[in-house]
Structures are given as structure tokens and as C-alpha cells.
Image (spheres, helix red, strand yellow):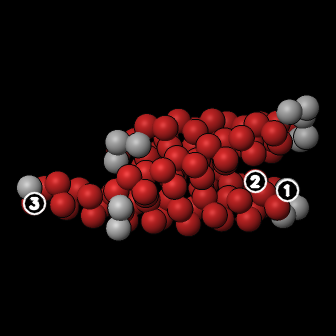
Amino acid sequence: MMVDLELDELKREFLAEADEKVREIQEKLEAEQSADVLDRLTYLAHQLKGSGGSYGYQRISTDAAELEKAVELRAKDGVQPGIDDKIQQHVFNLRAEVDRRVKELGN
């Protein structure tokens, strides 16, 4: 039983961090899409991709991986048709999944 409580606590910490990262991603998307902003978005998405799976949150990991790919494309090729919509969709999915998982664990 102790292991479950410890794991839940670790998951809570991860989700709190994920929530902050998704908030920062959302804020950055409203800013000018400079190289620095795109680098930061890639970094945040990469972190979520890596840690999401470790805590058993495959959807967070998958959406973060897709977001990372889309932002890298945006950085490399500039504005392409549909790329910004794709980025927004992945961020929307991440936000929804993090919120859902936080509710599920309860606090």
C-alpha cells in the first residue's frame, strides 16, 4: 500500500510540473514566434515527452512528441499551411490530458 501512496505522490509532483510546462507553452504561443521561443517550446515538449511515459502517461508523452515535431518543423520551415493549427491542437490535447489526470488522482 505504501508504494501506491508514494507513486501517487510522485505522479502528483509530475502533473504539477507538467501543468506549469503546459501553461508556459500556452503563454509562449501567444508571443512572437522567435527562434528563442521556438527553442523553448521544443525543450518543454521534449521534457514532457520523456517524463510522461515514465509515469505511465502515454498520451502526454505522445502529444508532447507530436508537439515537439511540429515546433521543430515550424522552426525549420517557417509558417507552413496548417502547422500552427497542428501546434495548437497538440497543446490543447496536452492541456486536456493533464487536467484529466490531475482530476483522476485527486488532491
Residue 46 appears in the rendering? no
In the picture, the quarter occupied by the C terminus is: bottom left
Q: Are marks 2 and 1 in contact (CB under 8 Å)?
A: yes
- Label 2 environment density (alpha carbons within 10 Å; few <14, some 14–19, many ≥20): many
Task: Please name which of the two marks, 2 or 3, marks the residue nearer to the observer.
Answer: 3
Q: Secondary structure at mark 1?
A: loop
- Label 3 environment density (alpha carbons within 10 Å; few <14, some 14–19, many ≥20): few
Q: Are marks 3 and 1 in contact (CB under 8 Å)?
A: no
Which residue shows up at 27% across the image and 64% down it? 9
54 to the left or right of 60: left
Which numbered tag is attached to residue 33? 1
User: Which quadrant would residue 56 be assigned to in this image?
Assistant: top left
Rendered location of residue 33, percent (x, y): 85, 56
Which residue shows up at 67% across the image and 48% down it? 91
C-alpha gap between disc 3 and disc 1: 46 Å
Q: Nearer the viewer, residue 96 or 61?
A: 96
The residue indicated by pointer 3 is 2
Which residue shows up at 23% across the image and 56% down it? 7
Residue type of the residue flagged with mark 2: Leu
